[in-house]
Image: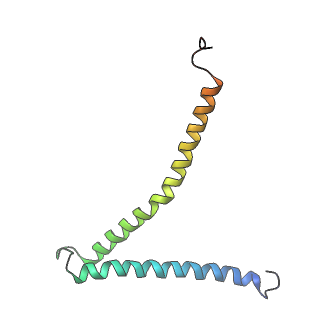
Amino acid sequence: MDALIGSQLWLPLFFIMLFCLGLSSMFGNLEGILTPLLDLHLVPPFLPKEIFTEWVYSIGVLLSTVPVISIPLVAFYKLLCFLKKRFMDRHDMNPYDT
């Protein structure tokens, strides 16, 4: 990477480009969901378009956080199971069992 001229400049530009690509994909997917729902008149007429867009976006954010939240919970559960097994092996609950 040192052979690239201006490598210290290209690194932040690359990550800014990735961030912009992610934002572009997010807005494209949001429009891909909202446009058919609005064109087919599946949205009640009393609900403003902006409020409906916020609800769809909020549901998408909540659904996307499920994998992020579940990974630490699974790791914590496995840690508790490991510690329980380790504690039970060390401290036998029945001293009369031979």
Which residue occupies the foreground of this view, 40 or 24? Answer: 40
User: Where does residue 69 sit, x and y in percent of width and height?
Assistant: 49, 55
User: Where does residue 88 sit, x and y in percent of width and height?
Assistant: 60, 27
Q: Residue furthest left?
A: 45
Q: Is residue 64 above or below residue 72?
A: below
* Left or right: residue 37 compared with residue 66: left
The residue that appears at 65% across and 82% down in the rendered structure is 14
* Left or right: residue 35 compared with residue 69: left
User: Tell me, what colour scheme is on the image?
Assistant: rainbow
Q: Residue furthest top?
A: 96
The residue that appears at 61% across and 35% down in the rendered structure is 83
User: Where does residue 33 sit, x and y in percent of width and height?
Assistant: 33, 77
User: Where does residue 65 sit, x and y in percent of width and height?
Assistant: 46, 61
Q: Residue furthest front?
A: 98
| Snapshot quadrant of residue 41 | bottom left
Q: How many marks?
A: 0
The residue that appears at 45% across and 58% down in the rendered structure is 66
